[in-house]
Amino acid sequence: MFGIRYALESDKAFWLTHDEHISENELLLKIRDGRGYIISDEDKSIGVLRYNLFLDIIPFLTMIYLDESYRGKGFGRQAMLFWEHEMCELGYKMIMTSTQVDEGAQHFYRKLGYKDRGSLFLDNTPFEQPQEMFMLKIF
């Protein structure tokens, strides 16, 4: 059964094994500010979701990750709908996310109503990767 809750400092070890893109210090800030969630099945932690504020005014989903055996079973969709509802309840009028163009997540986000709104190229930088596409959803 799906569950989601704010991450706690006691979740740090679980989180850091599932999210290689965040430092321990930044994770502690996410926990402090309530911008990180633990996704669960029954009482078992199975994934993480985190966000920040783009331009200090738009919630920007920066990570959703589920253990591989839980993908395609509706947990990601339920986590996104929970987060979207919470952002709406907090008074935000739109939300954002991004994904690399070579990743399948873009299709997941489009099914949830996100629209393509631009991209960023990081070639010839220390963060070189395939094109990063930005997606937006208006409430």
Image (cartoon, grey):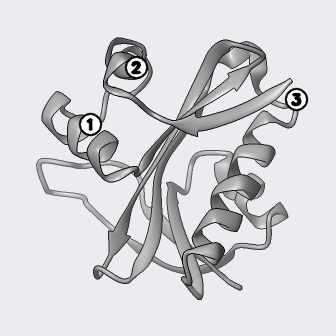
Above or below, 39 against 63 in this view is above
Q: Position of residue 32 (x, y in %)?
A: 27, 44
Q: Amino acid at mark 3?
A: Lys
x 75%, y 13%: residue: 69
With 57 as the anchor, is 101 left or right in this view?
right
- The answer for how far apart the CA atoms under marks 1 and 3 are is 27 Å
With 46 as the anchor, is 50 left or right in this view?
left
x 44%, y 33%: residue: 7
Q: Position of residue 39 (x, y in %)?
A: 63, 30
- The answer for how far apart the CA atoms under marks 1 and 2 are is 10 Å
x 55%, y 75%: residue: 90
Which of the two discs, 2 and 3, labels the residue nearer the N terminus?
2
Which of the two discs, 1 and 2, labels the residue nearer the N terminus?
2
Q: Are marks 2 and 3 in contact (CB under 8 Å)?
A: no
Q: Position of residue 64 (x, y in %)?
A: 55, 41
x 33%, y 48%: residue: 129
What residue is disc 3 on?
73
Q: Nearer the viewer, residue 71 or 41?
A: 41
Residue neighbourhood size for the residue with mark 3, other residues' Cα within 10 Å, grouped as few (<14), some (14–19), many (≥20)? few
Q: Amino acid at mark 2?
A: Asp
What residue is disc 1 on?
27
Q: Are marks 1 and 3 in contact (CB under 8 Å)?
A: no
What residue is disc 2 on?
11
Q: Element type at marker 3?
A: loop
Residue neighbourhood size for the residue with mark 1, other residues' Cα within 10 Å, grouped as few (<14), some (14–19), many (≥20)? many
* Quadrant showing the C terminus: bottom right
Above or below, 49 against 16 in this view is below
Q: Position of residue 104 (x, y in %)?
A: 68, 46
Above or below, 99 against 49 in this view is below
- Point out which mark residue 134 bears: none
Q: Nearer the viewer, residue 85 or 126?
A: 85
With 64 as the anchor, is 112 left or right in this view?
right
